[in-house]
């Protein structure tokens, strides 16, 4: 899995403490069994250490099924009220044999380009 965040200056309003990032995720099934992404759990922390949790079914309205070797890519967004922060979490998955397991989403930074004083 890979995650690539991008700061969206056009959707942000620093004067109003509104900062917005898009993030692109690629999930690849490197196993030998077909799996389905059931739900997500994101933990978003701003630079003051305040945590927001986002939980729900699927991603971008989908619960993709991935056969071995297949991948799924999507783009979503995250607002912050500080100029930097971080995100991480997990996807809840189910294999075709009915086993439930989590895939960790490694924590990544949300930082304004060309700004000092990052959280990470």
Image: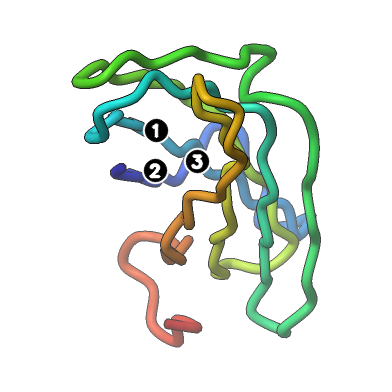
Question: Of circles 2 and 3, which is in front?
Answer: 2
Q: What element carries label 3?
A: helix
Within-10-Å neighbours for mark 2: few <14, some 14–19, many 20+: some
* Dot 2: element: strand
Q: Is residue 33 above or below residue 41?
A: above
Ranked by sequence position, the earlier of labels 3 and 1 is 3
> Is 83 left, or right, of 15 in this rendering?
left
Residue 78: percent from left, percent from top: 64, 44
Tag nearer the camera, 3 or 1: 1
Residue visible at 25% across and 28% down in the picture = 32
- Quarter of the image containing the C terminus? bottom left
| Numbered badge on residue 24 | 1
Which label was assigned to residue 88?
none
Tell me the mark number nearer the camera, choosing from 2 and 1.
Answer: 1
Mark 2 vs 1, N-terminal side = 2
Asked whether disc 2 touches disc 1, contact meaning CB atoms under 8 Å apart, the reply is yes
Q: Label for residue 9? A: 3
Label 3: few (<14), some or many (≥20) within 10 Å? Answer: some
Could you tell me which residue is drawn at 78 percent across and 71 percent down? 51
């Amino acid at each position: 899995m890979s995650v690539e965040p991008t700061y969206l200056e056009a959707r942000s309003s620093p004067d109003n403490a509104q900062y917005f990032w898009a993030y692109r995720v690629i999930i690849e099934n490197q196993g030998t069994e077909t799996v389905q992404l059931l739900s997500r759990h994101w933990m978003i922390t701003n630079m003051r250490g305040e945590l927001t949790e986002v939980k729900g079914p699927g991603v971008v309205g989908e619960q993709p099924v991935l056969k071995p070797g297949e991948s799924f890519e999507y783009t979503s967004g995250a607002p912050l009220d500080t100029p930097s922060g971080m995100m991480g979490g997990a996807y809840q998955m189910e294999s075709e044999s009915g086993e439930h397991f989590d895939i960790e989403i490694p924590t990544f930074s949300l930082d304004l380009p060309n700004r000092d004083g990052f959280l990470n």
